[in-house]
Image (cartoon, rainbow, N blue to C red):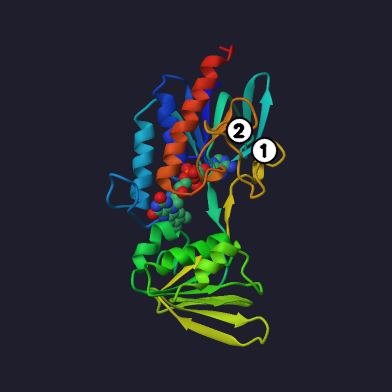
Amino acid sequence: TFDMLVVGGGPAGAAAAVYAARKGIRTGVVAERFGGQVLDTMAIENFISVQETEGPKFAAALEQHVRAYDVDIINLQRAESLALNKGLVEIKLASGATLRSRSVVLSTGARWREINVPGEQKYRNHGVAYCPHCDGPLFKGKRTAVVGGGNSGVEAAIDLAGIVAHVTLIEFGHELRADAVLQKKLRSLPNVTVITNAQTTEITGDGKKVNGLVYQDRASGAIHSVELEGVFVQIGLVPNTEWLKGTIALSKHGEIEVDARGQTSLPGVFAAGDVTTVPFKQIIIAAGDGAKAALGAFDHLIRSSVT
Ligand code: FAD
């Protein structure tokens, strides 16, 4: 039995594990892929005090930091369900094993929804991007598109318009779905073109990097292409909570609802990082959040009577 079991080994989970282990309690981390989204990232330039690093290097440093403590790392294992049983939290794994702990920190992260068109995978990190806060500055002075006209797409377009030369916003539906105030702001910008009722069909490139985007006008069926250097896909961030549905309170977007201490709707179960309702999905925020949830869970442990 663990005192604190962390589910997920990204920045949030790694921070939670270090904070727990430093309390001298029995700590475990179970992760499908230790490192998390950071493993798929190229340059990281916004983790304060580290001016520049690479994703895999950052992920290795996370693991090294956790391994410096007495933490049981159970890697390449997927959690499939959570239940409370006699004051303990039980996590069932895909392998069939069950882990038990007095407290749990859920930090299973999220994934960007993909448009699934030719070129998207090929040019990922070579012009295809998902995070304007992370990669916006790479496109300074260049032409970009944002695919998706919901709040995140329109926010991204407004953000990018201040950095890049030109932004083409492409929305599938016949109108933008973002809040009116964002749409008004967007339409006031001189270097933004909005195209609605358009289906992105391909991201083109020269073999090394992106050089354009092809879309179909859904009304006329006509095919158009736009020359550009970058495409930001903004059609949703999906929290990895499918396995928790019906067990724990989730927001309408599927994020785990947490309070200021990371406490979820279940006693002894805390959550941190991209998987939660905490706004702005970033490494530094997830890491801080993991530390906070571990301290929240520790506080819960010292107040509970089970030994
Ligand atoms: P994640 O990193 O998503 O980690 C989740 C962990 O949970 C993983 O170990 C995963 O394998 C595991 N997991 C998931 N489901 C299960 C399950 N059922 N059972 C067991 N384990 C499970 N942020 C920045 O601040 N700067 C950047 O430059 C930057 N660039 C990015 C570039 C890309 C391409 C991407 C995709 C994201 C980028 N981000 C960046 C965002 C950043 O990576 C995330 O905000 C951060 O990783 C979130 O950390 P997390 O620990 O909450 O979740």
Which circle marks residue 183 in the picture?
Answer: none
Q: Which residue is mark 2?
A: 264
Corner quadrant of residue 211: bottom left
- Which residue is more in the foreground, 226 or 5? 226
User: Identity of the amino acid at label 2?
Assistant: Thr
Q: Which residue is depicted at the point 56% across and 25% down?
A: 103
- Which residue is more in the foreground, 272 or 118? 272
Q: Around disc 1, counting alpha carbons within 10 Å, would you say few (fewer than 14), some (14 to 19), or many (20 or more)?
A: some
Q: Is residue 282 above or below residue 92?
A: below
Residue 39 is situated, as x and y percent measured from the top left of the image, at 42, 51
Query: The N terminus lies in which quarter of the figure?
Result: top right
Q: Is residue 8 above or below residue 177?
A: above
Residue 243 is situated, as x and y percent measured from the top left of the image, at 65, 42
Which circle marks residue 249 in the picture?
Answer: 1
User: Identity of the amino acid at label 1?
Assistant: Ala
- Which residue is more in the foreground, 49 or 5? 49
In the displayed structure, does residue 82 sit left or right of residue 16?
A: right
- Mark with earlier residue (2, 1): 1
Q: Which residue is depicted at the point 51% across and 32% down?
A: 6
Q: Is residue 185 above or below residue 93?
A: below
Rounded to the nearest whole Å, what is the CA distance between mark 2 and mark 1? 7 Å
Looking at the rendered structure, the secondary structure element under dot 1 is loop
Q: Is residue 98 visible?
A: yes
Corner quadrant of residue 207: bottom left
Q: Which residue is depicted at the point 37% across and 52% down?
A: 55
Residue 303 is situated, as x and y percent measured from the top left of the image, at 55, 15
Q: Around disc 2, counting alpha carbons within 10 Å, would you say few (fewer than 14), some (14 to 19), or many (20 or more)?
A: many
Residue 287 is situated, as x and y percent measured from the top left of the image, at 42, 40
Q: Are marks 2 and 1 in contact (CB under 8 Å)?
A: yes
